[in-house]
Image (spheres, helix red, strand yellow):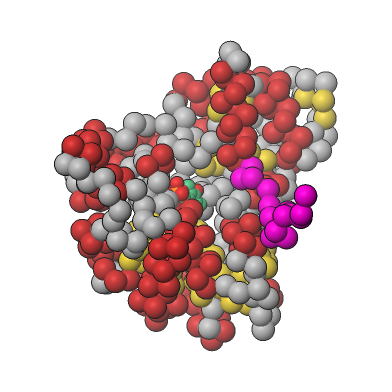
C-alpha cells in the first residue's frame, strides 16, 4: 500500500472523545461507571429549540443553505455580539460552522502556513495542537501554573515569541482549568500581540458559564484595537446543551470570514439546515432555560469543590467558569492505592477508572502533568457517588 499523507502520521484521536467512547462501552457492559470525564452537558436540549427543528423539517427547510450559513442566523449572531459583548459585527463578518471545533479548524486553515508558530497556553484544550499541525504550523505550548491562576503573563508570552510566531489561542473560561481571564489580564497581553502583529483566536465557547458574578471578557472587549486581528470562535453546544446538533459560528474581519466561507464551501457546503433553524431559535429565544442550566452547574461546582477539599492529596484551584475542576493530584503520587502506585496523572486516572469506576481525564492530554480534570457536567448524585468512592480509596492509603 502507498503511504498515507504525512500530516496524518502522528494524528491521534481526541483523547477525551476516545475515553468517553470507552466509558460508554463499559457502561453498556453493565459496569456502574461514574462519568466525570466527559465535557458535555447532561441536560436535554430545551423543548423550544427542538420544536424549531421539527418545524424546519415540516416546512421543508431541508436543502442546501448558503455556505456561510443562513442570513437570519448570522444576523442573530451579530445581535448576540452587540447585546452581550458590545462588539459590532456585520453579517458578512460571521460564518456559521459545523460546531465550534470546526470554526477553530477553519480559522486555523485560513490563518496559518507551514513554518508558522502558534502560541498555545498550557493547560490547553486537547484539540488545539493537532489542529495547528493540520494547518502545517507548529504549536508552541507556554506553561501557566495554578499559583498564577493559569493566567498567561506578558513575560511568559514574550519569552515564547520568535520571528515565526503568527498567532495565539486564548480560551476563557478555560477547558480544562475553568479559569476566566479578567479584562486587565487580557489587556496586559495586548501590546505584545499588537506590536508583533499576531492573530488572536479567541475560543469563547464557555462564555455563558461563569460563576460568583465573574464577568466574561474576550480580547476585543478588553482591547478594541485588537478586534481586526481577532477571530472569535463560538457555538451553541455548551450554552444550550446542543452538542449533537453541530452548530458553531465565528466572527472575524470581513476578509478572514470570506476566506473561511470559501474553505467551508469546498469542505462541507454548509452546516445542517435544520440545525441552523434550531440554533436560530436558541440564540433569539428566551434566555431562562440556559440560565437554569448555568445555575445547576453553579450548585454542582460548589458540591465538587467541597468534596475535593475533603480528600487529602488533591489541591484544587477554585475555577470561575466552564464546568471543570483541575486539581493538582501530585499529593496522591507514590501512595498505595488499592495495591497500585500512581506516579503520573495517566496512572492515577487509570487507577480511578479501574478501582473506583470513576472516569476522569489525566492532565497529560492537556499538556500539564500532575493534575487531573473532573467534569461536573454530571448529576449531583453522580458527583457525590464518584467523589465518595475516590475519598474511600484515598483514605485507605493514609
Ligand atoms: C466543547 C468545546 C468546543 C466546541 O465544541 P463544539 O461541540 O464543536 O461546538 C470548543 N472549545 C472548547 C474548549 C470546548 O470545550
Give the percent coordinates (x, y) of residue 165: 63, 77
Specify start and end residues of the magenta stretch as a single range: 1-15
61 relative to 302, above or below: below
Judge from the rendering whether residue 141 lies leftward or rightward of residue 50; answer left or right: right
Judge from the rendering whether residue 383 lies leftward or rightward of residue 270; answer left or right: right
The residue at 51%/40% (across/down) is 39
Q: Is residue 3 magenta?
A: yes
Front one among 184 and 227: 227
Furthest-top residue in this view = 30
- Asked where in the image residue 221 lies, by quadrant, the reply is bottom left
The residue at 62%/21% (across/down) is 26
Give the percent coordinates (x, y) of residue 264: 43, 62
Asked if one can make out residue 379 in the rendered structure from this viewpoint, the answer is yes
Q: Is residue 354 magenta?
A: no
Asked if one can make out residue 252 in the rendered structure from this viewpoint, the answer is no
32 relative to 337, above or below: above
Furthest-bottom residue in this view = 195
Give the percent coordinates (x, y) of residue 181: 47, 61
The residue at 65%/69% (across/down) is 137
The residue at 46%/35% (across/down) is 377
Judge from the rendering whether residue 384 lies leftward or rightward of residue 78; answer left or right: right
Amino acid at each position: 500500500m502507498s503511504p498515507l499523507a504525512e500530516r496524518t502520521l502522528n494524528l491521534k484521536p481526541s483523547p477525551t472523545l476516545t475515553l468517553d467512547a470507552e466509558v460508554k462501552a463499559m457502561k453498556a457492559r453493565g459496569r456502574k461507571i461514574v462519568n466525570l470525564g466527559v465535557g458535555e452537558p447532561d441536560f436535554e436540549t430545551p423543548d423550544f429549540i427542538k420544536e424549531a427543528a421539527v418545524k424546519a423539517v415540516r416546512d421543508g427547510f431541508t436543502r442546501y443553505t448558503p455556505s456561510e450559513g443562513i442570513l437570519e442566523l448570522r444576523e442573530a449572531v451579530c445581535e448576540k455580539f452587540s447585546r452581550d459583548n458590545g462588539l459590532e459585527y456585520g453579517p458578512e463578518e460571521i460564518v456559521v460552522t459545523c460546531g465550534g471545533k470546526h470554526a477553530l479548524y477553519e480559522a486555523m486553515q485560513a490563518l496559518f502556513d507551514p513554518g508558522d508558530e502558534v502560541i498555545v497556553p498550557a493547560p490547553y484544550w486537547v484539540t488545539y495542537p493537532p489542529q495547528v499541525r493540520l494547518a502545517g504550523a507548529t504549536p508552541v505550548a507556554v506553561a501557566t501554573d495554578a499559583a498564577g491562576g493559569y493566567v498567561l503573563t506578558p513575560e511568559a508570552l514574550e519569552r515564547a515569541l520568535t520571528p515565526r510566531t503568527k498567532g495565539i489561542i486564548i480560551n476563557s473560561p478555560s477547558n480544562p482549568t475553568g479559569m476566566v481571564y479578567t479584562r486587565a489580564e487580557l489587556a496586559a497581553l495586548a501590546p505584545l500581540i499588537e506590536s508583533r502583529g499576531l492573530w488572536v483566536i479567541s475560543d469563547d465557547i464557555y462564555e455563558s458559564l461563569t460563576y460568583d458574578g465573574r464577568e466574561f471578557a474576550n480580547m476585543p472587549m478588553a482591547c478594541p484595537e485588537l478586534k481586526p486581528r481577532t477571530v472569535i470562535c463560538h457555538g451553541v453546544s455548551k450554552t444550550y446543551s446542543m452538542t449533537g446538533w453541530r452548530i458553531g459560528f465565528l466572527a472575524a474581519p470581513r476578509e478572514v470570514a470570506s476566506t473561511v466561507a470559501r474553505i467551508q464551501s469546498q469542505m462541507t457546503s454548509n452546516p445542517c439546515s435544520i440545525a441552523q433553524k434550531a440554533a436560530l431559535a436558541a440564540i433569539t429565544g428566551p434566555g431562562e432555560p440556559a440560565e437554569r442550566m448555568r445555575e445547576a452547574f453553579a450548585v454542582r461546582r460548589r458540591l465538587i469543590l467541597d468534596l475535593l477539599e475533603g480528600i487529602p492529596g488533591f489541591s484544587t484551584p477554585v475555577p470561575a467558569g466552564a464546568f471543570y475542576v483541575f486539581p493538582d493530584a501530585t499529593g496522591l503520587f507514590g501512595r498505595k492505592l488499592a495495591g497500585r502506585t500512581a506516579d503520573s496523572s495517566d496512572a492515577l486516572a487509570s487507577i480511578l477508572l479501574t478501582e473506583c469506576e470513576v472516569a476522569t481525564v489525566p492532565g497529560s492530554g492537556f499538556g500539564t502533568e500532575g493534575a487531573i480534570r473532573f467534569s461536573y457536567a454530571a448529576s449531583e448524585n453522580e458527583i457525590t457517588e464518584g467523589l465518595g468512592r475516590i475519598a474511600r480509596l484515598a483514605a485507605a492509603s493514609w
